[in-house]
Image (cartoon, helix red, strand yellow):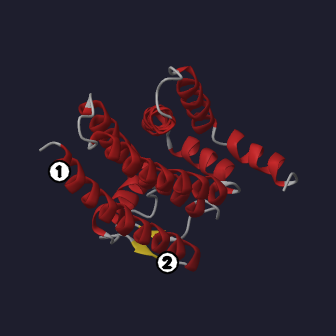
Amino acid sequence: MTAHVPRLAAHLRAHPRLLAALVTGMAAAWLLPATSALITRSLIGWNVTVWLYLLLAGLMMLQADHLRLRRIAVAQAEGAATVLFIVIVAAMVSLAGIVVELSAAKVPGARHALPHIALALATVAGSWLLVPTMFALTYASVYWRTPHGSGLRFPEADPAFRPDYGDFLYVAFTIAVASQTADVSITNPPMRRLVLLQSLLSFLFNTAILAFSINIAASMF
């Protein structure tokens, strides 16, 4: 197991924005008063991590031209599966934490129920946005493993077309919302397996979010 630690560290170094957000989130959770419940501190730390990472990743995507996109995608390709797995597991754990947080909001006579509900809503939104964002980055890495890109066929007729982060986000969020790839074709087995994984996770997340929405609505009345 210890042999995998340096490799994991190398994978995280290839994702400096994720590493910076993770360290900031852990620091935020640690600096909270010890009187706060462990689940609450953990969820606050998770939210700091997620929303900071989404901000940093969004800025990077907006500023990245084709050459920078390809360079980042290739650099992150080796550890993409590992990082994606860690993020998915953490997102699933955060959903379990929401259940506990909502239970605290529904305790008879519980004070300050609204902050618990607000924290649960922020966690649901952040976790949902994080997963397709990470899949978009993974799609870019899988696509650019070959010199000319492969795995996704975009409908543009121009042979010089090169997808940017907006195109990969389009694929990932279309799957997250509609469980389909719309006008983009999947052309090889690795990409099909990745799309299948996201489709299953999206169904699970969307079902969980529906259940949480009903639970939150019940907590408010």
Residue for badge 2: 187
Going 26% across and 29% down the picture, which residue do you hit? 111
Q: Residues within 10 Å of mark 2 (few under 14, many from 20)?
A: few
Q: Give the percent coordinates (x, y) of residue 199.
A: 40, 70
**Location of residue 87 in the rendering, given as x and y in whole percent from the top left corner:** 55, 51
**Snapshot quadrant of residue 3:** bottom right
Decide: marks 2, 1 in contact (CB < 8 A)?
Answer: no
Q: Which residue is mark 1?
A: 218
Given the current orientation, which residue lies at the most extreme right position?
3
Residue displayed at 35% across by 70% down: 181
Q: Left or right: where does residue 165 sit relative to residue 115?
A: right
Instruction: Count neighbours of disc 1 (C-alpha within 10 A) and say few if under 14, some if 14 to 19, many if 20 or more.
Output: few
- For badge 1, the amino acid type reads Ala
Residue 152 visible somewhere in the drawing: yes
For numbered disc 2, what is the local secondary structure?
loop
Q: Amino acid at mark 2?
A: Thr
